[in-house]
């Protein structure tokens, strides 16, 4: 993608912003201009720099209301901010000779939160998976581990940066006709007992021909191209920068990358009666180390891709 293509992406984003967000567009445009012209790409791994770029809006409350609805005032998904979306689009736009392209990602407006969109930004390795959204496992962890609080605090900052974000299909299916609940593949991953939000378990089973968990998604016509794309494992891994999750000689997923038992992932809320202290300590340390390395590697790749836009 050359500079002209980059400018096209930015212009399309600004047009979309103008249609959707009215008088707030000026403030967000300032962020985009800063991102496009003054951004230090190495800061993709720097939490404070990312926050300044992605959340630098004076009226944060209104920003959240416009972005996510009035019921979401207390939370903001860093993987689905406006600037996160523009990074996704710049990297994954479905165009010829783009080795990071995702199927049918044609317009910036293809990315968003909800079933009407083609793709939605999601977080790969989460903090809550291990420690809980309210740190239920945090105190237990430090009673078991001779590590400083700073180590986990660093990971808590790293996991909400671009190196830990991925685009996944937003299509939802109704798993149980008796309920009104509809799930995307990612929301299913986050709530199902088999996955417990662990990405290594999720991606290994998603790409397995023997696993029937994702049968309903594979039957959706709008996802046909995505799953055909997934069948070319080498291409799929490259486009999503998931090399850490695979044996690159065989292109087979590593099902227990974080060194946990396949069916007994130590999810924070039941660790007291499901795993012993030593197992939890070992797993927590492994998870932090592996996830942090993955985030760093992907941030470097994203940085290099964005740098190439200026060539």
Image (cartoon, grey):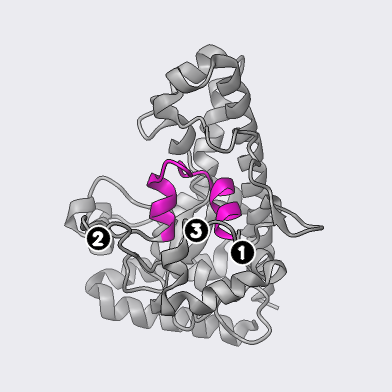
Q: Is residue 19 left or right of residue 203?
A: left
Foreground pick, 272 / 106:
272
Foreground pick, 222 / 117:
222
Q: Report the Cα–Cα distance between label 2 and label 3.
A: 18 Å
Quick check: is 292 in the magenta stretch?
Answer: no
Residue bearing mark 2: 177
Q: Is residue 69 left or right of residue 240?
A: left
Residue bearing mark 3: 212
Q: Report the Cα–Cα distance between label 3 and label 1.
A: 23 Å
Task: Please name the predominant secondary structure of the magenta segment in the image.
Answer: helix
Where is residue 51 drawn, in percent x and y?
Answer: 45, 50
Q: Please report the residue visible at 57 percent of the width from the left and 28 percent of the height from the top.
A: 284
In the rendered structure, are the residues bearing label 2 and label 3 in contact, judged by CB atoms less than 8 Å apart? no
Q: Report the Cα–Cα distance between label 1 and label 2.
A: 33 Å
Q: Please report the residue visible at 51 percent of the width from the left and 73 percent of the height from the top.
A: 89
The image quadrant where one finds the N terminus is bottom right
Where is residue 34 drawn, in percent x and y?
Answer: 49, 65
What element does badge 3 sit on?
loop
The image quadrant where one finds the C terminus is bottom right
Q: Which residues are magenta?
A: 185-207
Badge 3 or badge 1: first in the primary sequence: 3
Q: Please report the residue visible at 30 percent of the width from the left and 79 percent of the height from the top.
A: 18
Where is residue 90 drawn, in percent x and y?
Answer: 55, 74
* Residue 108 shows in the view: no
Residue 285 quadrant: top right
In the rendered structure, are the residues bearing label 1 and label 2 in contact, judged by CB atoms less than 8 Å apart? no
Say which mark, if any, is on residue 240: 1
Q: Nearer the viewer, mark 3 or mark 1?
A: 3
Q: Examine the rendered structure and indicate whether residue 245 appears above or below residue 16.
A: above
Say which mark, if any, is on residue 84: none
Residue 74 quadrant: top left
């Amino acid at each position: 993608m050359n500079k002209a293509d980059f400018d096209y992406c930015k212009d399309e984003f600004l047009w979309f912003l103008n249609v959707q967000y009215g008088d707030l567009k000026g403030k967000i445009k300032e962020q985009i201009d800063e991102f496009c012209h003054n951004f230090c790409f190495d800061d993709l791994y720097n939490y404070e720099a990312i926050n300044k770029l992605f959340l630098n809006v004076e009226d944060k409350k209104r920003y959240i209301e416009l972005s996510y609805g009035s019921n979401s005032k207390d939370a903001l998904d860093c993987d689905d901010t406006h600037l996160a979306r523009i990074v996704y689009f710049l990297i994954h736009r479905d165009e010829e000779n783009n080795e990071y392209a995702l199927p049918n990602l044609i317009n910036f407006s293809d990315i968003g939160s909800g079933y009407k969109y083609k793709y939605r930004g999601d977080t790969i390795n989460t903090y809550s998976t291990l420690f809980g959204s309210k740190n239920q496992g945090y105190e237990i962890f430090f009673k078991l581990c001779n590590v400083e609080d700073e180590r986990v605090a660093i990971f808590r900052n790293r996991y909400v940066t671009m190196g830990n974000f991925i685009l996944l299909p937003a299509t939802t299916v109704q798993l149980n006709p008796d309920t009104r609940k509809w799930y995307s593949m990612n929301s299913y991953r986050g709530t199902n007992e088999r996955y417990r939000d662990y990405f290594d378990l999720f991606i290994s089973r998603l790409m397995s021909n023997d696993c029937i968990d994702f049968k309903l998604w594979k039957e959706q016509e709008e996802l046909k191209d995505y799953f055909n794309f997934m069948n070319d494992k080498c291409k799929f891994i490259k486009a999503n920068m998931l090399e850490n999750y695979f044996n690159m000689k065989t292109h087979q997923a590593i099902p227990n990358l974080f060194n946990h038992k396949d069916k007994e992932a130590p999810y924070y809320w039941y660790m007291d009666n499901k795993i012993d202290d030593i197992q939890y300590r070992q797993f927590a340390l492994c998870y932090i180390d592996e996830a942090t390395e993955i985030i760093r590697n992907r941030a470097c790749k994203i940085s290099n891709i964005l740098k190439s836009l200026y060539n």
